[in-house]
Amino acid sequence: MRFRHRDGSVVHLGYSATVLPAADLDELIKWLDGCAGAARAELGVPTLGIGLWLVSPLADRLANSPVALRRLQRALTRHKLEVVSLNGVAHSAFVDKVVGSKVYCPDWTDTERLRYTVDLVDILAELLPPDAEYGSISTLPLAWREPWSKQRDAATRVAFDRLEFHLDRTERRTGRRIRIAVEPEPGCVLEMVGQAAGWLSTYVSPDAGKSRIGLGLDTCHLAVQFEEPGPAFETLWRAGVDVVKAQLSVAPQLVDPSDGLGRQVLADLSDPKYLRQVREWCGPGVDDVDLAYQLSGHACWRMHAHIAAHEPPPAPLTATTAVLDECLNRMVGGGHPMTHHLESETYTWTRQPRTRAQLAKRIVGELQWLRDRLTGLGLQEILG
């Protein structure tokens, strides 16, 4: 979906395919055929953006096989789908029963992370629509916070310098500008916007909006950390760090953690395979909701689970919708957009869809809700 901002530029709204990851090309095309294409048709839009998540073996194949890449391009064209962004945070489709912090491996101290990201750059340069201003790729906030050291940070700087060189070379070779969006996340080396702004200041371009490496703002992560959008955006502005991409969802919150039923509902909300970090307002946090008994319980809890903005969570939980609304207002409600890439990233549902058709309806509901928000901010949907 595309929207015309009041300054004349185009803002893209898409949907993150992390909701149904694909292990290989056949599975990915089945998802496009049976879900993404159906969602676009039901929305009645001329094109729908899909933020693909390509696990490492699939990314390697697409980057090195023109035949495989053309097959994917044909499927996208068939369903009038466009790709302006890729999700490069998770490298692998983990089969472990409990993944935990391994989801952040390999991190940016490992050369495999750079190799994988370079593959994504090469793929996106081919998939990007010719009229798109740039393409974006999300990546993890360096690593899980432990272990970390000056030596590991220095190794990461070397990797990012090589990545920036590849981005420059790709633009010169293809005419396609690809940008990297480093996404702060609870528990990682960069978990707060201020931390990320400081680390990313090295890559600020003298031309506003032109940095090849900038921030990926996740409204769920921001809310979980109890970061106020106003000060967060002020920090980015002062540091000159671009918001390359924004991922849109809300987090569940439990206003009264002394409510035993509420604690249970919170714990049941998302997949225990992955970390469900919990933060307490003005207090500490834990790396998983199963450890929340260590918190005082005297103030509001928020959990890292990307839930749908248009579906209220089960009582007594509420959602951080106000944070999402304020972020949207600041990013695209002003005279110039802070980012041109918006992506819905809901993958925790209060009622789990059992079929691709049911999932398509959920995607439609989420995007319709966001469409109303954007038009309410004065953006004009492009229907032709």
Image (cartoon, helix red, strand yellow):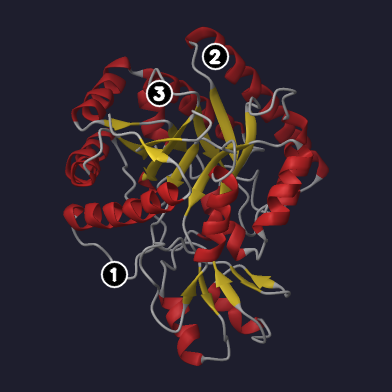
Look at the numbered disc 2 and give the secondary structure of its residue: helix
Residue type at tag 2:
Glu
Residue sitting nearer the eye, 214 or 365: 365
Which of marks 3 and 1 precedes in the sequence?
3
Look at the numbered disc 1 and give the secondary structure of its residue: loop
Neighbourhood count class around disc 3 (C-alpha, 10 Å): few under 14, some 14–19, many 20 upward: many
Residue sitting nearer the eye, 181 or 241: 241
What residue did someone put label 3 on? 128
| Count of marks, rendered view | 3
In the displayed structure, does residue 91 sit left or right of residue 142?
left
Report the Cα–Cα distance between label 1 and label 2: 43 Å
Where residue 232 appears, as percent x and y from the top left, is: 70, 52
Report the Cα–Cα distance between label 3 and label 2: 12 Å
Look at the numbered disc 3 and give the secondary structure of its residue: loop
What residue did someone put label 1 on? 351
Image quadrant in which the N terminus is located: top left
In the displayed structure, does residue 165 sit left or right of residue 149?
left
What residue did someone put label 2 on? 171
Look at 61% across and 16% down and name the residue there: 168
Where residue 14 appears, as percent x and y from the top left, is: 38, 41
Q: Quadrant of residue 92?
A: top left
Residue type at tag 3:
Leu
Residue sitting nearer the eye, 20 or 131: 131
Residue type at tag 1:
Arg
Asked if the residues shown at circle 1 and circle 2 are in contact, with their CB atoms under 8 angstroms apart, the answer is no
Q: Would residue 152 be seen by someone viewing this image from the given angle?
A: no
Residue sitting nearer the eye, 383 or 344: 383
Which of marks 2 and 3 precedes in the sequence?
3
Q: Quadrant of residue 123?
A: top left
Asked if the residues shown at circle 1 and circle 3 are in contact, with their CB atoms under 8 angstroms apart, the answer is no
